Image: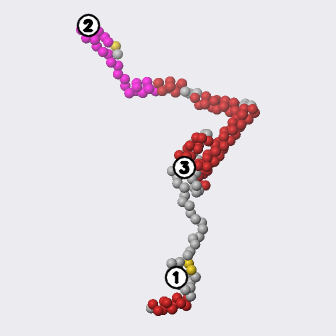
Amino acid sequence: MTEQNTGAGAPETAQSTFTQADVDRIVADRLGRERGKYADYDQLKAKAGEFDKLAEAQKTEAEKSAERLTAAERKAADAELSSLRLDVALDKAPEGMPVAQVRKLARRLTGTTKDELEADAAELFGDFKPAAATSTRRPIEALKPGALPAGQHGSGDPNQWMRDRASRA
C-alpha cells in the first residue's frame, strides 16, 4: 500500500484488488516453483538405492563375517539370559507349583544379572502360596469283616445279623 498526499492534510491509501483469476495464477506460479525444487527427488531416491546395493556388494568378507559374529553373539547372550531366567524361576518358585506355570512366569522376570533376576523372582513369587500337600495314598478304611463300620460291633456272623434284623421287624 502506498500513501499519497493530496495536499488537503489527510493521506489517502491506495488499495490493490485481485480477481480470482489473479489469485489462481499467483498460487499456480508458487506451486510450480516449489515442485521444481523437488522435481528430481525420484531420481535421487533411485540413485541412493543403487548406491546402497553397491556398498553392500563391496563389503569385504571380513565385514560380512564380523556382522555374522555380532549376530551370533547377540543370539547366544539372549539364550544365556533366557536360561538364567528359567534357572532362577525354578529355584524361587514355591514348592508344588507346576513347571509349566513356572516357565510362563520365568519369561516375565526382568534384569540382566542373577541378583536382579532373583530379586524380581522373590517379588513375583512372593504372592504365591505353596500348594497344599495332597496325599496320593488311598485312605485306609476302618471296616471289619461283614462290612460293619469300625464303631459298630457285631459277631461277624451274617446269619446272626439276619436274625437280629428279623427280630426288630
* Front-lying residue, 139 or 154: 154
Packing grade of label 1 (10 A; few <14, some 14-19, many >=20) is few
What residue lies at 24% left-to-right and 8% top-to-bottom? 8
Secondary structure beneath disc 2? loop
Residue indicated by mark 3: 125
**Residue 91 image position (x, y, % from top left):** 61, 49
What residue lies at 59% left-to-right and 43% top-to-bottom? 117
Secondary structure beneath disc 3? helix
- Give the amino acid at mark 3: Phe
Q: How many marks?
A: 3
- Give the amino acid at mark 2: Gly
> Which range of residues does the magenta coloring cover?
3-28
**Residue 123 image position (x, y, % from top left):** 53, 46
Q: Can the viewer see residue 75 in this picture?
A: no
**Considering only order in the chain, which callout, 2 or 1, is on the residue closer to the N terminus?**
2
Tell which tag, 3 or 1, sits nearer the viewer: 1
- Give the amino acid at mark 1: His
**Residue 100 image position (x, y, % from top left):** 60, 55
* Front-lying residue, 166 or 30: 166
**Vertical position of residue 1 compared to residue 69: above or below:** above
